[in-house]
Amino acid sequence: MAGTAPPKSDNFDEMTDAGGSTRDAYVDYCRWYEGQEPGLLKRKNSEADESFRRTGITFNVYGEDEAEERLIPFDMVPRIITAGEWRRLTKGIEQRVRALNAFLADLYHRQEIIRAGRLPERLLHNNAAWLPNMVGMTPPGGIYTHIVGIDLVRTGPDEFFVLEDNARTPSGVSYMLENRETMMAMFPDLFSQVAVEPVSKYPSRLARSLAACVPPKFDASNGRKPNVAVLTPGIYNSAYFEHAFLADQMGAELVEGSDLRVVDGRVQMRCTRGYEPVDVIYRRVDDDYLDPLTFEPDSVLGVPGIMDVYRSGGVTIANAPGTGVSDDKAIYSFMPEIVEFYTGEKPLLPNVETWRCADKDSLGYVLDNLEELVVKEVHGSGGYGMLIGPTASKKEIKKFRAKLEANPENYIAQPTLSLSTCPIYTSKGLAPRHVDLRPFVLCSPNGIEITPGGLTRVALKKGSLVVNSSQGGGTKDTWVLKD
């Protein structure tokens, strides 16, 4: 029989309590797990890797001599959240997403939050993601953030913190869906014993949510349904699998910039019958490359003139250009004030304590305590450009100190959190590893939808706090239990 209890961890373990008892969320799963033969589990673990390899679920790692294609490791022990925990989380997530959308609308119009002295104006002037082209522009339906990923970490039974916001082009939803499909294929009997909320409706909900954001010039009088397309940079992009996967699941067209052109004030898509209009573009191309006539003139990934069509109400771009300003980690540090300013409520989900290195006193504290802090670039992502003080060498700390002193405005610092752990399956049994969670949120004029679960990323290396796939992390299926 398979043993259940992983070795004890000094951090909050989501499966077992300090006394070794199984927590409520995992009781049914552990009962099933104890009845499995170790040899079967070992074979199933190998099958999962082979399944992902056959499906082509890979990502590209850049920044080395050559781009390297890797398989994202999948762990077959699910991360389980109770219905009550999920209800509390969704209230906080919805509040934060509403505040983010209101914040972006304000930044590109009256900037009341800056007038009120709640946000320094320099954060816009120093932010490359701020787009003056969007000033005065209201996207169709007033929606800036059509798809949002909110990264959460846990430190205790009822202690969840927002680690960062992803309002530009959040990725990872295809892995959420494939993880669930893989688990259901490998262990169909398990899902008959544990009642889990489904995630399979996400593609249809995404299609419906995007179609609800039609541009002002869309004409439905002839019975035509909105044409939705996924704009990808192409097969060499690190997330191309996801672009193709979502287009296929939604029944939308997967297009590159060369497949689109502006004709008679509309964005038109090349098809077998010539060209037909595209109404909503789910773009996975960064702002700088969307339109060579407006942004980077050498870009071959976008569509010349698309921004003019967008401003004139001829097409919807999701997410709206300029939303990346809210992903900035310096902006993140003001999110408690932002939530309260636009909702009139205290944040239901707190931020991680953050020191802004642009502030002289904060910089002094950070420099004095580098060995204990996590320091991040304000525009960084993917686990790059950061220092984890407790695991860094003296040489690394010295090198980072010089960068911090030379350009303090480029960094923020946070305490090293005691992240919760979930067990992973290893050849020696279950072992605790640190995790985070990215729930996916859809926004349209019809409301906000949050898929029950999300993408759990796990640091597969013992003791590591970095869960990013580009830094050796893996993924898990995330279960939200039904009531």
Image (spheres, rainbow, N blue to C red):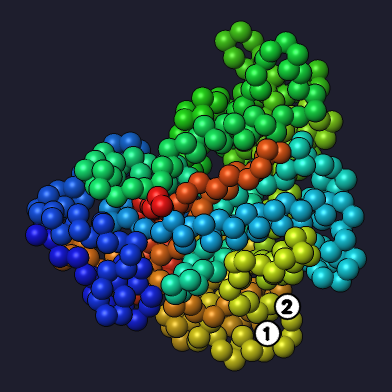
Nearer to me, 15 or 313: 15
Q: Position of residue 25 (x, y in %)?
A: 34, 61
* Mark nearer the N terminus (2 vs 1): 2
Q: Which residue is mark 1?
A: 363
Nearer to me, 105 or 399: 105
Which residue is at 59% across, 58% downward? 91
Residue 78 found in image quarter: bottom left
Nearer to me, 433 or 402: 433
Which residue is at 49% across, 79% downward? 416
In the rendered structure, which amino acid carries the disc numbered 1? Leu
Q: Residue at the top extreme?
A: 273
Q: Is residue 460 visible?
A: no
Which residue is at 82% across, 35% downward? 311
For label 1, count other residues whose C-alpha is less than 10 Å away and answer few (under 14), some (14-19) or many (20+).
many
Q: Which residue is mark 2?
A: 358
Circles 2 and 1: CB atoms closer than 8 Å: yes
Q: Position of residue 285 (x, y in %)?
A: 62, 41
Residue 37 found in image quarter: bottom left
Compared to residue 257, the image places residue 379 above or below, namely below
In the rendered structure, which amino acid carries the disc numbered 2? Ala
